[in-house]
Amino acid sequence: MRILLAEDDEVLTGVLVESLQQQRYVVDTVEDGCFAVEYAETGSYDLLLIDVGLPRLDGISLCQQLRNAGCKVPILLMTAKNAPNERIRGLDAGADDYLTKPLDMAELHARLRALLRRGDVATSTVLEVGQLQLNPVSCEVSYADCPLKLTPKEYSLLEMFLRNPTRVFSRSQIVEHLWTFDDPPLEDSVKAHIKGLRKRLKTAGADGWIENVYGLGYKLSPKIDYEAIAAKKATSSGELSAAVSSQVPLKSAAKAASEDLGLEDSALERSVEAQFQQSMAALWQQHRALMDKRLALLQQATSALKQNKLTGELQQAASQAAHKLAGVLGMFGTDEGTRLARALETALANDDKNALTYVALSPLLEALETVFKETDKFLTRFGQADEAIVSTPTSSLPVASQSIQPSSTATTILAVDDDSVFLSALSPLLEPWGFSIVLLSDPTKFWEVLIETQPDLLILDIEMPQVSGLKLCQAMRSDSQDNGRWQSLPVLFLTARNDAAGDVFAAGADDYIVKPVLGPELITRISNRLERSRLLKALSSRDTQTGLVNQIQSQQDLQQLSDRGEGYTFLLIQLTNLAEINLAYGHTAGHQVLQAWGNEIRAQVLTLPARIVASYWGNGEFVIGLAMDTERDTKDAIAPLLQTFRQRIFTALLAVQSDTNASAQSGRFQSQYALGFAHYPTQGKSVERLYQVAYGAMQKVSQ
Amino acid sequence: MSKTVLIVDDEEDALAIATLGLQMKTDWVLLQAGSGQQALDVSAEKVPDLILLDMMMPDMDGKATLAALKANPKTQSIAVILMTAKQEPLTQTGVDPEQVVTVFTKPFRPLSLADEIRTVLGW
């Protein structure tokens, strides 16, 4: 890996070069900004390490100049202490991360690893669907290159849809995303904002992009004008597209394609999708051995590398295996797999022996192994569930028993009905909404399957030959084992009788539906039940601002982590300037910051391949328990999260009259944090003790 | 009349996925070839409307296959789309851009492959 270091302080340059070389980086140094531009443009660097205060051309202008010239190399800025505005300007200019002086070498290397892992940085952060573009930096929206004027709420709505292009948002979810707790709107006003947004999109030419999903909410439904895009591409980009346009009557092609799309019934599309998934599952099975062979080659090469025994032959074979995986994993729906395989390929194709290290390869390989497992789980579930219904329609369907693991993220529904034909009709109805369905046609196995699947919601038939659904429901409600966990499980009854209401509610059900069941009605009722039960659960164990578990709940969770008998790292992240933010920009801003941290922790930490507890203890303190043994592993694992927040610039929603702080007037600010680590069990056995150790060890990182 | 498409890839899984994707979305007649030589034989015999040609294959790679296709009067007018997992511009591979319709980068979305083909070829 080659690094360009631009720093005018000779002493610091010497220290940095030595430390970087120790880590096997190849380093070039320059002393001023103008030379830095020349070097960066001519040499091929993997990373630029730039001091802000350079002579001739300062570091921030340097960033700007490089990014404008299309340079995508990651840039790490070194800034002075206590210069938040400098940092914000640097990030705006296109830097990827910053470090404050005096430099902590361990921290520097952790940041370098994180940035280098990521490879080329996208020069733009623009969200783009078809001809619709939203630039989160400048808050500008355009359609077909024409700027669109939106109100702040309309803008936030659109951003939310673009960031979650396939998700359906209910009105209450929209409220949760876009409004603060202090200032909740009426649900009707969501409707008004949606209407406003639709109108503006329509005026710009994007008609019908926000779809009303009956009984559920809204989702993005882009009507992409392929014709216009293709025409634009043909005129603007390089020789390849020129070749295309010369040979092909583009116009009619695009027209045919868009007509095709328009005609396709969305239900039909869904069934094609489902059918396709099934066939993909079969293909995955069929070619599993081949994939495993490729993965094995990579594993072999990595462990050979660890023992310093990697031969050129094996390296080349492994590089080829990575190449093949990159080509095929994405088609099985895992872009992440392709990205990882590509990174491995690049690493293995590098002839520079120093650059190829076990440390660089092994995290990639581990992540790739996880991708394999996930894909396995996802695709085999698809195949099996449907196969079972098709092949054994009359026998019992304890599909659950082998394949489905209880998962905290996917919503699992257990449906019990002796009529297996009816059951099999439920899957295609509910699966498109992201529910995972477990079907059971033999009610005598009810308890077994219930405990195994731990569903989030239960659908019961009232009348079944062996056991009555009402009895099952009553038994669940009066079962006080395991903290009475079945007492609060939402239960929906399905019944052919019209007069069942009394019995159903007496048995402890939450709702009931009269057969024949209509799709939209069923989905609406399920969502209502789930939302309500989540709300109740959340109130008791979750922090409402961050969406993470609260202190009380996390004590239990951490206890469980230590009960497993393995070590874990207790990590304390403290937002050090929360009080100042509240003071300068109002509590809305503080809430915005907490919410952002909560969201990112859920997205980046809870998804790590290890046992994790992530919680918010109040007063700006986040506590994370990670089942990783060393501080360094933990640091690497959370590096992307921390980086996100060093890059994140918040904008105060409300203009606060402030006479205390000059930078407050710009309304832009960052959250600052400090970190503390403690290891279980070596540094403490109780959660309280771990907290004390971590608090004591806290270092100010982003001051 | 329904179109005929020949898919050429030495990786049997990639071949199967591309075929599956097209099968689900079109009524095209789909032919398969597992090597460059096989591709030449099949295309000379059946003269498909389009050849989806993988770039990286052992023995006879995409570039060589393309050259052979263009050298044979029987097959030279067949449209060819290259498929490659490498993210490098066409110019660096030494392939004459005039000889191919476009390049698809792997991994492609199997279900959108048909639409992409329709778009570039005007089918």
Image (cartoon, coloured by chain):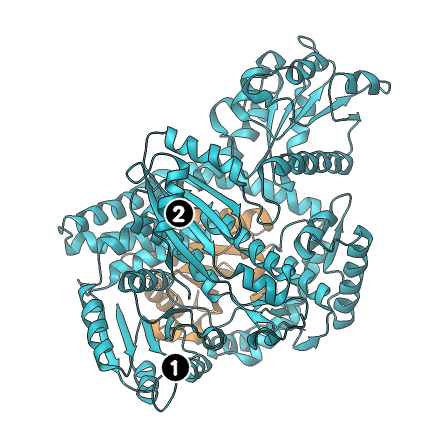
Distance (Cα) linking label 1 and label 2: 33 Å
Q: Amino acid at mark 1?
A: Gly
Residue that lies at the very extreme toward the bottom in this rendered image:
A56
Residue A249 at least partly seen? no
Which residue is tagged 2? A571
- The residue at 57%/71% (across/down) is A668
Question: Badge 2 sits on which subunit?
Answer: A
Kind of residue sitting beneath label 2: Leu
Q: Which residue is mark 1?
A: A59
Frontmost residue, A232 versus A508: A508
Q: Residue A599 placed where, x, y %?
A: 55, 52
Question: Is residue A402 or residue A647 the one in the foreground?
Answer: A647
In the image, residue A486 above or below residue A98: above
Q: Give the image location of residue A154, x and y in percent.
A: 72, 64
Q: Position of residue A693 (x, y in %)?
A: 35, 45
Q: Chain of mark 1?
A: A
Other residues around mark 1 within 10 Å, as few (<14) / some (14–19) / many (≥20): many
Q: Residue furthest front?
A: A660
Residue A390 in sight in this render: yes
Would you identify the image quadrant in which residue A134 lies?
A: bottom right
The chain that appears orange in the image is: B
Answer left or right for B107 relative to A412. Answer: left
Residue at image location 56% in from the left, 26% down from the top: A454
Category of crowding for the residue at label 2, using alpha-carbon neighbours closer than 10 angstroms: few (below 14), some (14–19), many (at least 20): many
- Palette colour of chain A: cyan
